Amino acid sequence: MKYRENPQNGDQLSLIGFGCMRFAKDEAEVEKEIRYAIEQGINYFDTAYIYPGSESTLGKVLAKGLRDKVKIATKLPPYLVKKYEDFDKLFYEELKRLQTNYIDYYLMHMLTEVSVWERLVGLGILDWIKEKKDKGEIRNIGFSYHGGKDEFIKIIDAYTWEFVMMQYNYLDENNQAGKSGLQYASSKGLPVMIMEPLRGGKLVSNLPKQVYQLMNKENADRSPAEWAFRWIYNHPEVTVVLSGMNSMEMLEENIRIASVAEANAFDTNEYQLFDQVREVLNNTIKVPCTACNYCMPCPVGVDIPTCFSCYNDREIEGKFAAIGKYIMQTSLKSTPSNASLCIQCGKCESHCPQKIEIRNELKNVKKSMEGFYYKPARFVIKKFMKL
Ligand code: SF4
Ligand code: SF4
């Protein structure tokens, strides 16, 4: 395993961090994976108050003598804080779930704009942080972020942060905070933790044929996931890259890549490869949804990320395959979850870190994926599946 140093405090952090948002379903399997990850040198585990069951599951495993071998990163959900007392209420609940008495890396979860931080400051968070740091209950304070570059810089400048977490991958080099945001954070001496390195899996499977051809031509031994990780590791400004690893196979592959990849290692051909791949992908992806689920649940049951995923796949996998998938995925439930159910209430849009115009895009999904065939096909499937 390769490590990069946190320039603020000298911590040696594993290049790949364990993203704990979606653990495997079986607890014994999760424990096996966490133990294996630690044995192989992964020492950064990222969870959050709002990831269902994640903090408790991680806490249960780490309590078996593993706590001191890792750094735990977890997050405060700012929108659940209404008054000063809520800081303690949420934080101590997190400590209890994680079965620990300190958090190594504590983040304000998804600060979308500086005003969200200012509201917390108004509620007294600066005194609260000082108290927690004095007691040794919080070691480092940071924030996670999904918005644009300008607001990212404003938030960085609004406080003496000790680390930041941002979305970054080869398709988002110039989206969101992007490369310039990464460089700005690094120029301030901040370690940068990266999320969405594979863009919710979109950079791994069902890519256009042309992308596979381009990648194989450059180096047939590297999978699309390996290319995507190597692209990020090539940036010296990056400290830890988080990956949601919920199978042993994925864990082994990611550890292998993080054990060999270097910063500033790309040659001209490799840089050119990514220019070409980006061009192909940008021509195919219609909705930049990362399947983060922050917009969910929808009050009328629309499965927003699934609708967008199938819609995007139409360009990549072809019309019939994508529509078939859409019908199956929006019908194989006791209640339907297709795009045309949307009542245009708009509740989802303010939660979307990608600033997707969800209502408009769902209209497009409805138009392309719910032709005359949709209802009869759904009827047949439901009858067949006895739903
Ligand atoms: S706008 Fe549509 S998809 Fe979004 S929450 Fe409202 S009904 Fe659901
Ligand atoms: S629409 Fe936005 S909030 Fe919803 S899953 Fe996609 S990226 Fe996340």
Image (cartoon, grey):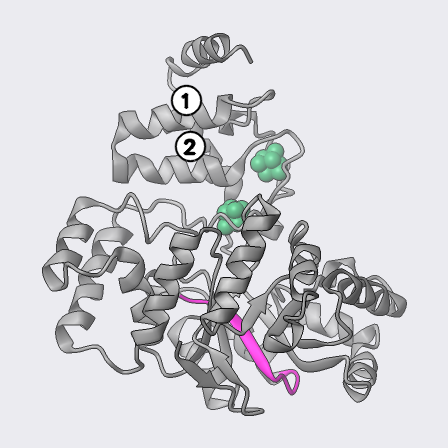
Up-down: is 278 above or below 325? below
Q: Nearer the viewer, residue 311 or 103?
A: 103
Q: How crowded is mark 2: few (under 14 residues within 10 Å), some or many (20 or more)?
A: many
Q: Residues within 10 Å of mark 1 (few under 14, many from 20)?
A: some
Disc 1 marks which residue? 370
Res. 368 image quadrant: top left
Going by the numbered disc 2, the residue's amino acid type is Val
Residue 195 at x, y = what percent? Answer: 48, 64
The reply to whether the residue tagged 1 has its Cβ within 8 angstroms of ligand 1 is no
**Magenta highlight on residue 286:** no
What number is the disc on residue 4?
none
Residue 21 at x, y = what percent? Answer: 57, 55
Going by the numbered disc 1, the residue's amino acid type is Glu
Number of numbered discs present? Answer: 2
The local secondary structure at tag 2 comes to: helix
Ligand 1 positioned in quadrant: top right
Q: Nearer the viewer, residue 216 or 376?
A: 216
Distance from Cα at disc 1 to Cα at disc 2: 8 Å
Q: Can residue 229 be seen in this view?
A: yes
Disc 2 marks which residue? 365
Residue 369 at x, y = what percent? Answer: 38, 26
Residue 74 at x, y = what percent? Answer: 65, 67
Which residue is drawn at the image coordinates 38% and 13% (left, top)? 372
The local secondary structure at tag 1 comes to: loop
- Asked if the residue at tag 2 contacts the one at tag 1, i.e. Cβ–Cβ closer than 8 Å, the answer is yes
Which residue is drawn at the image coordinates 13% and 52% (left, top)? 213
Magenta segment: 158-168
